[in-house]
């Protein structure tokens, strides 16, 4: 766990921010904090490091063409996050305790604060640990949540150390001051931001439509709820504590800044390093995107042949190949994919899509049309694993709940064909043909 490092300032500060200074800054070194705070160009180095953080976050998660914010998203978010943190901190604590004759103004202070804030970016490079290549998808999600907690806690402690050094207050008080806007931000992001989030709305609509979230999404939602609740109650506790333990002293403003030298060569070398790290994972992501496009276009056989050509190890380990059984489109695309499978296809592909079929039947309500069901089970009947799948998912098949009296002649014929296919693979026809239509 991060522990504030208390070192005495040296007689003179280095002219400019170096990589050594940045590294020592991550550990709360007093001299490094003062060097960063007095350098008016520190924010430039910070922005460069934040852009590298975008690569560290995303290189193994998505292709850079998937979003216009792939590279600049962390910078945009950190701009608003840092600004919010600063102005809440300024309005609630710093302004009232800074001597009037020493106050340089909130805007000038903001520049100094953002340089300090952006230079915490290397902490987030922990996200680059390829946990998806070390664990299965669920454990990888747990590891990513743990990394998120470590990075968040480290940043709060580091910014508290910065306030303690520059404003010359006790670390415990600085921690309380920084934690207040941090908790407010978490509450806003979780409870307000989630409401307007398209992904949040999609998960709600999917749930209303009878679909389950993936185990990884359920874990993330649980962690998000825990974080929001913890931040809310921590905020109340901090408000009471700060009201009881009032601060009556005076603090120093952020120091006056002068331009220093920037470590351009070192930053370019670091940037090149992250580009090299990203090359192979981005190739894997590119293959995923091509496979995705084929599935969306209904080119199911071509999509299967494409991934068979490369093998699973040449595709992103942290992403489910399409069609994702936890998306609505799987009700159409998964039957089409299984329908074109052949016994000669690699076993890992057959096993993966049969597993997807089982997950499709795990949803609360099955929205599988007779046409799609007929195509899927026809394809499954040709696979050597077909009978085993039916045996393992015998109880799930009851969700089909075919109604003999419903539908036109063609639909009834399709349903009868599905029953015949499943019966030939070992299913019990009496469990499949019911008199109640699926709801």
Image (cartoon, grey):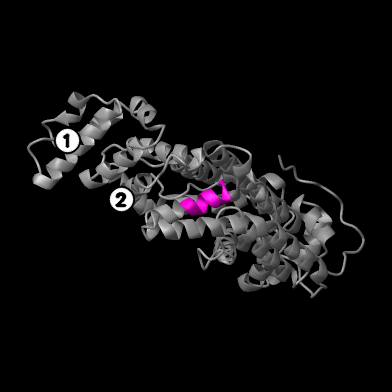
- How many tags in the picture? 2
Q: CA distance from mark 2 to mark 1?
A: 18 Å
Decide which of 9, 220 is in the foreground and name it: 220
SS under mark 2: helix
Residue 307 part of the magenta segment: yes
Residue 158 sits above or below residue 388 on the image: below
The x, y position of residue 162, in whole percent, is: 72, 55
Instruction: Answer with left or right where residue 359 lies relative to residue 439.
Output: right
Taking the view exactly as shown, the residue that stands out farthest to the bottom is 259
Looking at the figure, which quarter contains the C terminus?
top left
Q: Is residue 381 above or below residue 17?
A: above
Residue 257 on image: x %, y %: 76, 72
Q: Quadrant of residue 238?
A: top right
Which SS does the magenta portion mostly show? helix
How many neighbours does mark 1 have within 10 angstroms: few (below 14), some (14-19), or many (20 or more)?
many
- The picture places residue 356, in percent across and down from the top left corner, at 40, 40
Q: Is residue 398 left or right of residue 312?
A: left
The residues colored magenta run 305-311
Q: Is residue 27 left or right of residue 209?
A: right
Q: Is residue 249 left or right of residue 436?
A: right
Quarter placement of the N terminus: top right
Q: Which residue is mark 2?
A: 332
Helix, strand or loop at disc 1?
strand
């Amino acid at each position: 766990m991060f522990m504030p490092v208390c070192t005495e300032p040296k007689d003179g500060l280095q002219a400019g921010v170096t990589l050594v200074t940045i590294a020592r800054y991550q550990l709360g070194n007093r001299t490094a904090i003062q060097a960063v705070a007095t350098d008016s160009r520190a924010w430039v180095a910070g922005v460069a490091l934040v852009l590298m953080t975008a690569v560290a976050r995303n290189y193994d998660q998505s292709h850079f063409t998937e979003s216009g914010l792939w590279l600049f998203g962390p910078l945009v978010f950190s701009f608003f996050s840092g600004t919010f943190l600063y102005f809440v901190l300024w309005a609630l604590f710093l302004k009232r305790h800074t001597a009037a004759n020493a106050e340089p103004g909130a805007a000038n202070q903001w520049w100094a604060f953002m340089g300090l804030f952006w230079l915490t970016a290397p902490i987030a490079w922990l996200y680059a640990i390829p946990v998806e290549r070390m664990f299965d998808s669920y454990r990888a999600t747990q590891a990513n949540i743990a990394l998120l907690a470590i990075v968040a806690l480290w940043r709060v402690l580091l910014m508290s150390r910065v306030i303690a050094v520059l404003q010359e207050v006790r670390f415990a008080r600085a921690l309380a001051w920084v934690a207040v806007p941090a908790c407010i931000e978490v509450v806003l992001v979780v409870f307000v931001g989630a409401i307007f989030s398209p992904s949040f709305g999609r998960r709600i609509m999917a749930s209303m439509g009878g679909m389950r979230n993936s185990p990884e999404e359920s874990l993330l939602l649980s962690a998000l709820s825990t974080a929001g609740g913890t931040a809310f109650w921590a905020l109340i506790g901090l408000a009471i504590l700060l009201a009881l333990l009032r601060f009556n002293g005076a603090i120093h403003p952020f120091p006056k800044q002068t331009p220093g030298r920037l470590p351009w060569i070192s930053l370019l070398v670091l940037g090149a390093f992250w580009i090299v790290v990203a090359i192979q994972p981005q190739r894997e992501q590119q293959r995923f995107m091509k496979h995705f496009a084929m599935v969306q276009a209904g080119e199911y056989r071509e999509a299967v042949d494409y991934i068979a050509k490369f093998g699973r190890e040449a595709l992103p380990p942290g992403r489910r190949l399409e069609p994702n059984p936890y998306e609505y489109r799987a009700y159409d695309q998964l039957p089409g994919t299984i329908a074109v499978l052949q016994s000669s296809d690699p076993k890992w592909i057959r096993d993966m899509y049969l597993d997807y079929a089982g997950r499709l039947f795990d949803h609360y309500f099955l929205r599988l049309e007779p046409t799609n069901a007929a195509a899927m089970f026809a394809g499954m009947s040709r696979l050597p694993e077909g009978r085993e799948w039916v045996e393992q998912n015998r109880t799930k098949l009851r969700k089909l709940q075919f109604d003999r009296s419903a539908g036109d002649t063609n639909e009834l014929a399709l349903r009868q064909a599905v029953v015949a296919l499943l019966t030939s693979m070992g299913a019990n026809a009496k469990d499949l043909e019911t008199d109640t239509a699926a709801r």
